[in-house]
Each structure stands twice: as structure tokens, then as C-alpha cells.
Image (tube, rainbow, N blue to C red):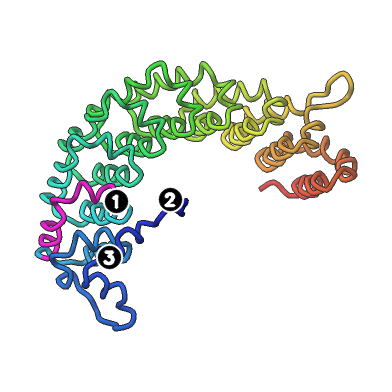
Amino acid sequence: MIQNQPPRRHDDFTHNLRSVLLEEFRSNSKSNKRYELKDIFTHVVEFSGDQHGSRFIQQKLETAHTDEKEIVFNEIRANSLQLMTDVFGNYVIQKFFEHGDQIQKSQLAKQMEGHVLTLSLQMYGCRVVQKALEYILVEQQASLVKELDGHVLKCVKDQNGNHVIQKAIERVPAEHIQFIIKAFNGQVPNLAIHPYGCRVIQRMLEHCDEEAQTSILKELHACNYALCQDQYGNYVTQHVIEHGKPEDRAKIIRLVTTQLLHFSKHKFASNVVEKSIAHATDEERHEIVKTVTALRPDGVSPLHLLMKDQYGNYVIQKLLIQVKDKDREILVDQIKPQLQVLKRHHFGKQINAVRLGRLCDMKRL
């Protein structure tokens, strides 16, 4: 009868297969022998797949002579594809993209041809693809990323593949990644609320040309209300506020102002409100102050409600920090009479009252 056993570690599988040289290297702390790259020639592949051996090779490659690197490279070349997906071997391949010569980088990229999608979706392979895109020439960049054509959305939604798409957007010239941009047409609202898709959209807003950005922003603006309240979409909206054009920022801030009370009490949208306050013009902040201090028929303003709210109180604190002159006076005049009431609430609201009180007493620089 076969009994259940705990899963074995990578080390366990290789322990009985280690050469004498690798065993000696791993127990080197007892002998204090100083190893150099030449000491492991003919054993480079084995060392690359070992935790300690891989680290040793990585360190030595940073300062190795050209002839040493060539010997090491020639040993791993035939096994490079396997090493790319190995928990320790992938780091050796990455080091060659960083410190190898252009011929070595080109040959490694050649080994990847026909396997880019598989590598991109694999935990360690995706790191190698990213590193390759940083260091190979444009012609090979274009060749490698082209293998992802038809699989863009699959990669974007994958925990590993999304990083490759991000790197392609950052590093590969626009004319070679048009298929990525086209794959997003009509998909932006759904991808903006995806845990990985939201990151890719932010990279597109940073690196794509104006035409592509305009297309993405058009789709985003059509669903700003929902994005502000989404756990992932709010990051995209915040990105537009912080890094976007004034006209795109203004659209979101107008929405925030009209939805100020609702958004400020929302776990995710309140972050968008704070970002809006931080990047608004003085005129836009003035409108926010007017909205938050406007008294309702019952004599209560949104400000009074937000002071007691677990998210809204941070919005008020941010507003106190950012506004100045008359707008700040209006805020302080409404806040101070409410502080004693706030202090009588439970501990968390007592802390908020103290913070608000300190901010009210601060001199605006």
C-alpha cells in the first residue's frame, strides 16, 4: 500500500545524482577551498541546476574574462532551453543576457524561437523572456514577441505572461507590437478590472504612442464611474489622474466632485478621491471644498458625515493638507466644532479626531 508522502524539494531529487565535484563544492565551508569558474568546467550545466552552484556561476559571470564566459556558454547552450524553466538555472541564463556578448545573447534568443509562449506562461521562463527583451537587438525582439500574436489576452490574464507583455510594451518599438494594441480594442473595460490586466493598461498609458493612448482612454472614460469603485480599476483611474494629460485628469476630477460623498465613503473609490485632491488645480480643489461643505436642509454637510467615516476621514485629512487660504479657513471652521463630538465615538474615531485637530492647527505652507 502506497502511503501519502510530503512533496519532495528540488534539492531532494538531485541529491543522489550530484557529482563528486558538486558535493565537494556544497560542503566547501569545511575545507575553505576558493573555487573559480575553471574549477567547474565540464560540470557547468549540473552546477546551474543547483541552488549554490547557480549562485556561484552568477557571481563569477559578472567579472569573468571573455574566454571563461565562452567556455561556460558553450557548455550550457545545448541545455539552455531546459535551464530557462529551471528554478535555479534560469538565473544563469539571465546573467548571460546581462553579461554575455551580443553573439551569445543572439544564440540564446535563437534557442527560444518556437517556445516563447510556453516560456512566457512558465514561472521561471517568463523571467528569461523579460530579460531577453531588455538585452537583445530589435530584430530579435520583434521575432520573439511575434510568437505571442493571437495569444495576447491569454498572456495578459496569466500571472506570469502579463509580465512579458508589460516588458514588450516597455522595450519593443511600437511598430513591432501593434498586434498587442489591437488585441485591447474593445477589451479595455474588462482588462482594467483584471488583477493583471490593470497593470498592462498602465504600461500602455506610459509607453504607447498618442493614437493608442487616445483609443484606450476613450474606453476608460466610458466606464470611469465603475472603475473608480473597482478593486483593480481604481489603480488605472489613479494612474490617469497622476500621469495623464490635463484634459483626461479633469474629466475624472469632475466625476469625483459630483460623486464626492459616495466615492469618499467607498473603500476603493476613496483612493481615487485622495489622488484627485493631490493632483487637482486650485480651482478644482475649490469646487471640491464647496461640494463637501455645502449644508443640506437638515444643517448637515457631507464634511460632517465624512469625518465619521472609516474612509472619508482620510479624504478630509488629504483636503486639509492640500487646500490653502480661504478654502482652508472654510474647512477648518466646519471641522473644529465637530471634533468634540467625534472624540466621544469609539477609539478609531478618537484617533481621527486628534489627526484632524492637528491638521486644523497646522499653518499652511
| Image location of residue 257, percent across then percent down | 66, 24
Kindly indicate the quadrant of the structure image that contains residue 40.
Answer: bottom left
Q: Secondary structure at mark 1?
A: loop
Q: Find out whether residue 192 is within the magenta segment.
A: no
Nearest to the observer: residue 10 or residue 345: 10
- Up-down: is 310 above or below 230? below
Residue 337 picture location, percent across and down: 88, 39
Given this view, does label 1 or label 2 mark the residue nearer the observer?
2
Q: Which mark is residue 53?
A: 3
Other residues around mark 3 within 10 Å, as few (<14) / some (14–19) / many (≥20) = many
Residue 83 among magenta residues: yes
Nearest the viewer among 302 and 227 is 227
Q: CA distance from mark 1 to mark 2?
A: 29 Å
Within 10 angstroms of label 2, few (less than 14), some, or many (20 or more) residues? few
Q: Does the CB distance between marks 2 and 3 fall below 8 Å?
A: no
Mark 2 or mark 3, earlier in chain: 2
Q: CA distance from mark 2 to mark 3?
A: 34 Å
Q: Which residue is mark 1?
A: 86
Q: Secondary structure at mark 2?
A: loop
Q: Position of residue 93 (x, y in %)?
A: 23, 53
Q: Amino acid at mark 1?
A: Asp
* CA gap, disc 3 and disc 1: 13 Å
What residue range appears in magenta? 68-85
Q: Report the disc number at residue 2.
A: 2
Crowd class of label 1 (few under 14; some 14 to 19; many from 20; radius 10 Å):
many
| Residue 282 visible in the current orientation | no
Question: In the figure, 237 relative to 296: above or below?
Answer: below
Q: Mark 2 is on which residue type?
A: Ile
